[in-house]
Amino acid sequence: MSSHWKQDFPIPSAEDSYVTRREFTKFLGLTSLAFFIGTCATAGRKLFKRIRGDQGQRVAIANLSEIPVGSYKLFRYPTENDPCILVRLSEDKFAAFDQRCTHLSCPVIFDAATKQLACPCHEGFFSAEDGRPLAGPPKRALAQFSITTQNAQIWVSRPEDVA
Amino acid sequence: MSLGMRVRDRMNVILQMVTTLIAAILLGQLWLFSIALDAMENRTVSMRVAIVAASISMLACIAIWMLIRFFLRREQNETGERA
């Protein structure tokens, strides 16, 4: 015997959950549109970041006497939200990299003994010469900046190769 | 089996084929989205990668809408009604 409320308020549940073919295909189309908009938004954000980064022109970040051989200095470039690291490998050899590990963005630290940049989070290692990954989970090289010295100062600028 | 039921069955089969194709394209779009995200996060990845990903995603989106349009038009021709 069915309940009284079912007789008084019959709910056709089968009809309720029925999805027409038109609705279903529309849902698929809208999902595709959402993916496209998301991809465009991320590409737009990349473009915005690049334009904003271009505003950061050549900047003096340290004096030559400030950094002895085998040491490093942290700085921010091109914006205050972009941590970077400058390392002095020899008397006249410097290298500057984005400090964020290419694995999960932990800050890398310089190990002068091995001349490597190490990510302490997941044991990732990069070459301090060119930023290429040597060991651990990172697969991509650290973003490198161009370094020039002039008037006893170290200048950093964006590399030309990444468009 | 009546003619109406046969037509409905055929449309269901076509819908399954179209849905499979659309699902494959959607997976591709998801992959492109992940590539664009990666390009946004990583400075070493070129801007061109993100632009190409967005362009291909647009083509995929157009393809999906055309497939849907094709299916709905065919359904309308076969059944004479908007399902």
Image (spheres, rainbow, N blue to C red):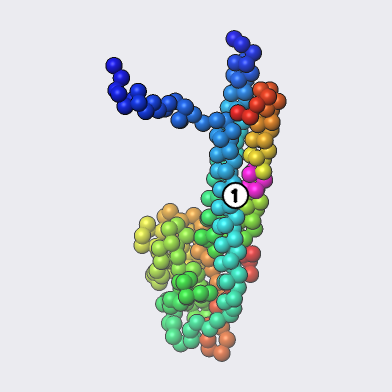
Residue B35 at least partly seen: no
Chain for disc number 1: A
Instruction: Between residue A21 and residue A101, name the one nearer to us.
Output: A21
Kindly identify the residue that appears in the image at 29 percent across and 16 percent down.
A1
Say whether residue A29 is left or right of residue A111: right
B44 to the left or right of A75: right
Q: Secondary structure at mark 1?
A: helix
Residue with the most extreme top position: B1
**Outermost right residue:** B77
Residue extending farthest front: A8
Question: What's the residue at 53%, 55% (across, down)?
Answer: B37
Closer to us: A8 or A48: A8
Question: Relative to A38, is A16 above or below?
Answer: above
Q: Position of residue A161 (x, y in %)?
A: 63, 66
Residue sitting at 60 percent across and 20 percent down?
B8
On the image, numbered disc 1 is attached to which residue? A36
Which class describes the residues within 10 Å of circle 1: few (<14), some (14-19), or many (20+)?
Answer: many
Most prominent secondary structure in the magenta stretch? Answer: helix
- The relative height of residue B10 versus residue A18 in the rendered view (above or below) is above
In depth, the one of A130 and B14 nearer the eye is B14
Residue A148 x/y as whole percent: 57, 80
Q: In this picture, which residue range is highlighted in magenta?
A: B57-61
